[in-house]
Structures are given as structure tokens and as C-alpha cells.
Amino acid sequence: MSKKKLPIPFKIVKVEENQFSVFEDTLVVDASIQQQIGFGFGVDIENKVIAVSMEFVLNKNELPLIKQEITCYFELKEEVFNTLLKKDKLILPCEFGKHLAVVSTGTARGVLYANTKNTEFNNFLIGLINVDNMFNEDIVVEI
């Protein structure tokens, strides 16, 4: 009988939109679009919450077209959260960190859609992201 590791249960408790900007002057620039994506991780020990920030930027010729940053807050059960604590660090298993990044990306797509609905910017979206290539190790969050 194989032993399958059980997933880490969590729930989204909050979504914050830290930044949303569109740059109409860049719309008319005739150039290809470059996408930049970044993730950051944080922790709230008291509330047993892991924060995942996702920054998304579209550029044309290095000029910003759309900038967005959101943070998703994920609450874990206390007993599970405590197993991730190691001295002055929280260590997220790599696969779990990837999963939270994927959920945050989906949330960012929805926020982008809602913010650009009925505008010319609604033609732009967050492209496919291979999170597997972005994280290869456990994610260590300093406390």
C-alpha cells in the first residue's frame, strides 16, 4: 500500500489589491508586449496566515502598460501551521508554495478582468505561467 502525503488544508481569508495602474499613453505604442511576473511570501504567525503577493507588469518597449499587485491571505489550521515553523522561519513545502502561487495567479486574473472590464485594457491578460519553473525548493519565510 502506497502512502500518499495528505495536502495541507487552507482557506483564502482575504484578497488585497495593493496596486492597479493602466497607462493609456502606452496603448498607442506599436511594439510587442513583455510580461513580468513576481511572487513574494509572508507570514502572520498570530493568525496562522500565509500571504502570497503576485506582481504582474505588462510593458511595451520597457514602457509600462498595466501594473498590478495583489496579495492573497491563506489561513491554515493551527496544528498544520505549527508544523511549518522552524525556529525563526516558516518553511513552505515547495509543492504547497507552488499551489498557493497558482491560486494567487487565478485570483489576479479575476481582479485584472474586473478592473479592465469595458475598457481597451480588457484585451490584455496574464499569460500562461509555468510555476513549476519558478520554484524548485522549499520556500523559506523569515519571521
Image: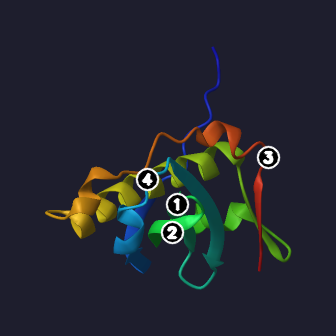
| Residue 137: mark | 3
Q: What is the crowding at mark 4: few (fewer than 14 residues within 10 Å), some, or many (at least 20)?
A: few
Quadrant (top left/top right/bottom left/bottom right) for the N terminus: top right
SS of the residue under disc 1: strand
Look at 86% across and 74% down and name the residue there. 87
Among the two numbered marks 2 and 4 on one chain, the one whose residue lies closer to the N terminus: 4
Q: What residue did someone put label 2 on?
A: 64
Residue placed farthest to the bottom in the image? Answer: 46
Among the two numbered marks 3 and 1 on one chain, the one whose residue lies closer to the N terminus: 1
Contact between marks 2 and 1 (CB within 8 A): the answer is yes
**Left or right: where 62 falls relative to 136:** left
The three-letter code of the residue at mark 1 reads: Asn
Question: Relative to the observer, which residue lies in front, 24 or 43?
Answer: 24
Among the two numbered marks 1 and 4 on one chain, the one whose residue lies closer to the N terminus: 4
Quadrant (top left/top right/bottom left/bottom right) for the C terminus: bottom right
Estimate the spatial distance between the alpha carbons at disc 1 and disc 4, rounded to whole Å: 11 Å
Estimate the spatial distance between the alpha carbons at disc 2 and disc 1, rounded to whole Å: 4 Å
Q: What residue did someone put label 4 on?
A: 30
Among the two numbered marks 2 and 1 on one chain, the one whose residue lies closer to the N terminus: 1
Q: What residue did someone put label 1 on?
A: 59
Estimate the spatial distance between the alpha carbons at disc 3 and disc 1, rounded to whole Å: 29 Å
The answer to which image quadrant residue 122 occupies is: bottom left
Mark 3 or 2: in front is: 2
Estimate the spatial distance between the alpha carbons at disc 3 and disc 2, rounded to whole Å: 31 Å
| Residue 81: mark | none
- Report x, y in % for residue 133: 69, 38
Question: Relative to the observer, which residue lies in front, 91 or 60?
Answer: 60
